[in-house]
Every structure is written in structure tokens, then in C-alpha cells.
């Protein structure tokens, strides 16, 4: 009996350590994204990250998935680590498609993140219409007695893509996977409509950016007697300096 209790305690500690590692890896990625959000909030006119959501698979969900993949025999933590890549996941939601690739590029530049795999379901959507960009990244985790490389799945999508994916998940959950063909076809049509909306919003976003850039250039021009002069940066700085002096008086 005592031997059984010792074994049970050891197994519980192993499971706890295993899940903790994925939680810490998720915390690392969340911190990186929070830093990017804060930087854009303070230094840039526009923040491409609307919001984020993270989740850690439960031991029950992990066990069900590994059984579907490998059957009932020879299941251990090593097999789970090798075959289940989405234990820790974080979803980043953006306004525009361009933002998705922008955030992806920024994450790839992080020296302590190793990108293992990229699945682009935006350029090549799934047959059901699902769109999203998936990154599998490896994150170093420093425990008290060891360093572990832990995989985190990052999904980056627009608001429209996220809304569709959420709706599709709810419908399949309600029907317990047996969804009528009519609903599947309607979901695919809805996915195509969401993609068209994303593209229209992307085009509007670019047009607004071009108008803003043009206005900024025009503001730095001086027109005298129908002749146009560019204002040097030093001149603009002089104006700002004079204005600050007047404001302090």
C-alpha cells in the first residue's frame, strides 16, 4: 500500500511538472505579445493586435487526443510531448490580413523563439472555409534543475475569421459532429463572405493610409505665388521650438 502511494505521488508530480512547463511557455509568449502591444500603444499611431486569448489543454483532452492518435497502448508523457503540439495555445486577433503577417514576422525575429512550422490557412484555406495563420514555436523554459524546450501553438486571424471559427465550433459542438450537409454548405458560403469582407476592409485600410501619407506630405510643403517649396526638417523643428517657448510663457 505504501509503495502504491509513493508511485501515485511520483506520477502526480510528473503530471504537474509536465503541465507547468506548458503553462510557463504560454506565459512567456503572452509576455512577448503584451510587450509588442505596449510598444505599439506608446510609440505608434496604430496597434495591429486587437486582443489575445490563451488556453491550456486539460489532461483529459490531452489523453483523448493521444488515444485517437496512438490507441490505448504505450501512452506516456514522452509520446504526448512528441505527438500533441497544441497543448499550449494562444490566439491573436487582428483587424486586417496585413496585420497577421506583420505580427508573424515580428514573432519570428524573437531570438529565443524557434519557429518549427507554419501553416497558412489564409492563402490556402481548409475545404470547410477555415482561415487562419498557425505557427508552432519552441520556447525555452528554465526550471530549477533543467531547461526544457516547449512547443506553443500561435493562431493569428482577423476578427471576421475568428467570428466564423467560433460559430463553426459551436455548430459542430451542438450537433455532436454530425452536421447536416446544408449547414456545412452555408458555413462555407459564410467563410467566403467573411473573406470578401476582410479583403474589402484591407483595401479601405490601405487607401486611408495612402490619403494620410499624402496629407502629411502636403503639410510639409510651402506654396508661394504658385511655386511649391519643401520645408526642411530643421525649419519644422524651429517652429515646434518657438511654439513650445510661447506655450511656456
Image: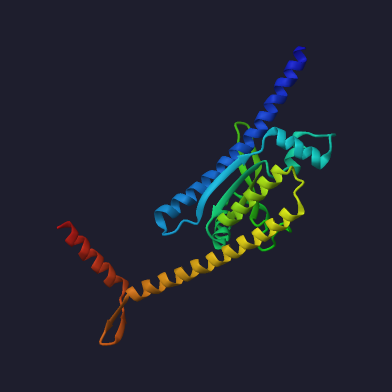
Q: How many discs appear?
A: 0
Q: Say left or right for 80 vs 170.
A: right
Q: How is the image coloured?
A: rainbow
- Write down the quadrant of residue 148 in the picture: top right
Q: Is residue 122 visible?
A: no
235 or 131, which is in the foreground? 131
Residue name at image x 49 percent, y 51 percent = 36
Rendering coords of residue 46 (x, y %): 44, 59
Residue name at image x 62 percent, y 51 percent = 155
Rendering coords of residue 30 (x, y %): 54, 44
Q: Is residue 246 above or below residue 30?
A: below
Rendering coords of residue 225 (x, y %): 25, 87
Residue name at image x 50 percent, y 57 percent = 48
198 or 122, which is in the foreground? 198
- Write down the quadrant of residue 14 in the picture: top right
Q: Is residue 36 above or below residue 54?
A: below
Residue name at image x 35 percent, y 76 percent = 218
Q: Say left or right for 159 vs 229.
A: right
Task: Name the image quarter holding the N terminus.
Answer: top right
Q: Residue furthest top?
A: 1
226 or 76, which is in the foreground? 226
Q: Is residue 6 above or below residue 192?
A: above
Task: Name the image quarter holding the C terminus.
Answer: bottom left
Q: Is residue 207 visible?
A: yes
Rendering coords of residue 149 (x, y %): 65, 42
Amino acid at each position: 500500500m505504501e509503495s502504491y502511494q509513493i508511485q501515485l505521488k511520483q506520477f502526480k508530480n510528473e503530471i504537474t511538472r509536465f503541465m507547468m512547463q506548458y503553462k510557463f511557455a504560454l506565459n512567456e509568449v503572452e509576455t512577448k505579445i503584451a510587450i509588442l502591444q505596449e510598444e505599439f500603444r506608446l510609440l505608434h499611431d496604430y496597434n495591429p493586435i486587437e486582443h489575445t486569448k490563451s488556453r491550456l489543454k486539460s489532461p483529459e483532452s490531452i489523453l483523448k487526443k493521444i488515444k485517437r492518435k496512438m490507441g490505448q497502448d504505450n501512452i506516456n508523457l514522452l509520446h504526448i510531448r512528441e505527438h500533441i503540439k497544441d497543448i499550449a495555445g494562444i490566439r491573436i486577433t487582428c483587424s486586417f490580413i496585413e496585420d497577421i503577417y506583420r505580427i508573424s514576422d515580428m514573432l519570428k525575429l524573437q531570438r529565443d523563439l524557434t519557429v518549427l512550422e507554419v501553416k497558412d490557412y489564409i492563402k490556402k484555406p481548409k475545404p470547410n472555409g477555415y482561415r487562419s495563420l498557425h505557427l508552432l514555436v519552441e520556447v525555452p523554459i528554465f526550471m530549477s534543475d533543467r531547461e526544457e524546450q516547449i512547443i506553443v501553438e500561435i493562431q493569428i486571424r482577423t476578427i471576421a475569421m475568428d467570428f466564423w471559427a467560433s460559430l463553426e465550433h459551436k455548430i459542430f459542438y451542438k450537433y455532436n459532429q454530425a452536421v447536416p450537409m446544408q449547414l456545412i454548405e452555408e458555413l462555407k458560403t459564410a467563410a467566403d463572405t467573411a473573406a470578401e469582407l476582410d479583403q474589402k476592409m484591407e483595401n479601405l485600410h490601405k487607401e486611408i493610409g495612402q490619403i494620410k501619407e499624402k496629407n502629411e506630405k502636403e503639410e510639409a510643403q510651402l506654396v508661394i505665388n504658385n511655386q511649391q517649396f519643401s520645408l526642411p526638417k530643421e525649419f519644422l523643428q524651429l517652429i515646434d521650438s518657438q511654439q513650445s517657448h510661447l506655450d511656456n510663457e
